[in-house]
Amino acid sequence: MSTSSPEEAKIRATEIAGYAIISDDNKIAGPDGLLPPSMRNEKDWEYYQRALAGSDLIVFGHRSHELEPNVRGDRRIVISRGVDGLEQRADGWWWNPARIKWAEVAKRLLPVGGAVAVPGGKGVFDLFLGIGFDAFYLSHAHGVTLPGGQSIFSACDKGLSAETVLSTAGLRVSEKIALDPARGVEMNVWRAVREARGASGRT
């Protein structure tokens, strides 16, 4: 006979998924930090928005948070060095990873687990490479280059491809989605190849 409480029975894994569209040169934005028209794709955007709407928590960098208004009222975390740990503001939770670890954040905000979406930017993607992605939905806008733009990962500034970075982090392609073949946009779904970890157990 189980002695688990009703709340314990509801606990599920905390699944972290990254979302990005990149150019041929592994960029997510132009030199101005903005996504240029050449990288905008309606089908990719629709897929991304459905994913965010189905997530329990969304992690943005400060700039990305400002550029993408929270029209649905999604539950957000904004990463910033200007806060002391984790604090709640009118526009969401604000988190300083230098002051408090992800495991503590997850325990507080996702006590029974849930889906975490990570849309970036680069600093946020770098952070969660260390924490550990369970999946990464990587779209590719073929035929587009953004010289001087912002790379998806810092390692790409040293010549590595986004695919190499994800592979090195322990992820492998599990699915290919032809989002918009007419416009040269496809998605590869990368998933972690590792033993299952407990909910909120990352550091």
Image (tube, rainbow, N blue to C red):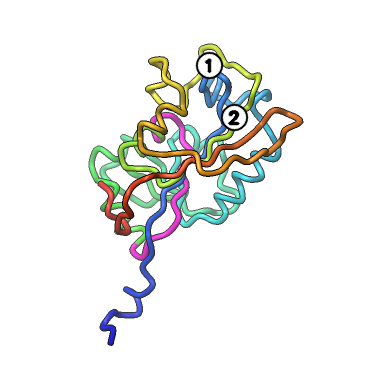
Mark 2 is on which residue type? His
Q: Earlier in the sequence, mark 1 or mark 2?
A: 1
- Residue 72 placement, left or right of 118: right
Give the x, y percent position of residue 59.
43, 44
Quadrant of the image containing the N terminus: bottom left
**Magenta span:** 111-124
The image quadrant of residue 14 is bottom left
Determine whether 160 is above or below 183 in the image.
above
Mark whose residue sits in front, 1 or 2: 2
> Most extreme residue toward the right, as rendered?
182
- Which of the labelled discs sits on residue 31, or is there none? 1
> Most extreme residue toward the bottom, as rendered?
1
Mark 1 is on which residue type? Pro
- Residue 35 placement, left or right of 126: right
Q: Nearer the viewer, residue 169 or 17?
A: 169
Identify the residue shown where x is 56% and y is 37%.
Answer: 188
Q: Residues within 10 Å of mark 2 (few under 14, many from 20)?
A: many
- Residue 177 placement, left or right of 93: right
